[in-house]
Image (cartoon, grey):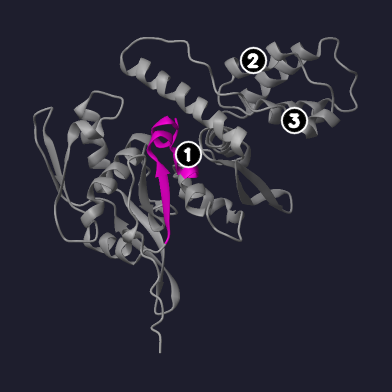
Amino acid sequence: MAKPSQPYRTVDTRPSKDSLVKPGELVDLIEVTPLTLTDRRIYNQLLENAWEAIDKPVLHVIAKSDLRGSHNSNDRVGESIERLMSAIVKIEAVWDGKPAIERVQLLGGNLEMARADGLLEYEIPPRLRKIISNSTIFARLQREVMFALSSKYALTLYEMVQKRGNLRWRSSEKFSLEALRGVLGVPKGKLTSWSNLRMRAIDPAVEEVSALSDYMVEVQPIKTGRSVTHVELRWWRKDGEATGKVERALQFASTGRKAKAEGRTEEVAPISTKPRPGWLDQQGVALKTQTYETARLRHPGYDIYYVEGEWRSWAAGKEPPADPDRAFLAFFRKFAEANPI
């Protein structure tokens, strides 16, 4: 009688020169202590460095210079290590066949050499080692993309999509708004309304991940009554032409990071901005290109097309303005004052 096949374990997956492996349980976790973009990048590097023996009770050593990325300060590395040590995360688990919540620390004790070119010795906490050892789902992260993404929300969304991208019969997943906020690491008391969460965190992350990764991504709101209570995350793999655009976008992002690290400015072709959505065409003709650019410059972080939709809904039934572009910018200013992010 043939023995039942054993599930493929995450720890059996090998990193490559261009990518690293992250256990799925460490992707969809909820941060009790919010982390920064730098913290998340450094933690991914610590996992990669420890991977060969990550489920073993051993110490791991890495050069601090390998963790600095595009900046030159050891202070930032030390601050990230301390935040990672104090961070507590919640992971969905099963206990006696029933759903449970497991709380673990991300990083154990460590020893850091004082010299700038020194080493960092660290350990993975025992309970976390057990979780990683039992993991059967993982995300493969492209190192270049990880360093190109410019916000912690974008990096987290990228990891979520990479974890799910190869699922054979699935291309979407629903989350409660509370669950999504937790996974993204939105601090308590911040971005409390759906409009602020969407404009400040979700839409910029979706645009960046769609531009720099191998997948196109959407996050669609789902209402219960009049309020947004859930969202649906959708993803699909790009075709050949779109993949070529990703490579060019990554080249531009890499050039920009290098210029910033060297303390010089350099004109870098930007990632193309999100096109005006089709549903707005039904509400009126597009405004001037410079009007949209002015709105972006005056009100960074806002979804200008969402605000345009709000303006057109407000103006419906009123006398058309003599100068729609000026009227929109005036409305945008009042909207931003009433809905700060």
- In the picture, measured across the screen, residue 108 lies left or right of residue 34, that is left
Q: Badge 1 is on which residue?
A: 153
- In the picture, measured across the screen, residue 17 lies left or right of residue 192, that is left
Residue 242: x, y in percent? Answer: 60, 34
Residue type, label 1: Tyr
Relative vertical location of residue 252 with respect to residue 266 in this rendering, above or below = below
Figure quadrant of residue 241: top right
Q: Residue at x 24, y 47 (%)?
A: 85
Q: Residue furthest front?
A: 1
- In the picture, measured across the screen, residue 110 lies left or right of residue 205, that is left
Residue 47: x, y in percent? Answer: 28, 48
Residue type, label 2: Glu
Q: Residue furthest bottom?
A: 1
Q: Secondary structure at mark 3?
A: helix
In the image, 194 versus 42, the foreground residue is 42
Is 184 covered by the magenta stretch? no
Q: Badge 2 is on which residue?
A: 293
Figure quadrant of residue 337: top right
Q: Do residues under tags 3 and 1 come within 8 Å of each other at their CB atoms? A: no
Is residue 341 visible to the viewer in this orientation of the structure? no
Residue 102: x, y in percent? Answer: 36, 64
For the C terminus, which image quadrant? top right
In the image, 309 versus 113, the foreground residue is 113
In the image, 294 versus 44, the foreground residue is 44
- In the picture, measured across the screen, residue 153 lies left or right of residue 198, that is left
Q: Which residues are magenta?
A: 137-158
Residue 251: x, y in percent? Answer: 45, 24
Query: For the residues marked 3 and 2, what is the alpha-carbon distance in whole angstroms?
Result: 18 Å
Residue type, label 3: Glu
In the image, 241 versus 279, the foreground residue is 241
Q: Residue at x 31, y 25 (%)?
A: 70
Q: Residue at x 32, y 12 (%)?
A: 263
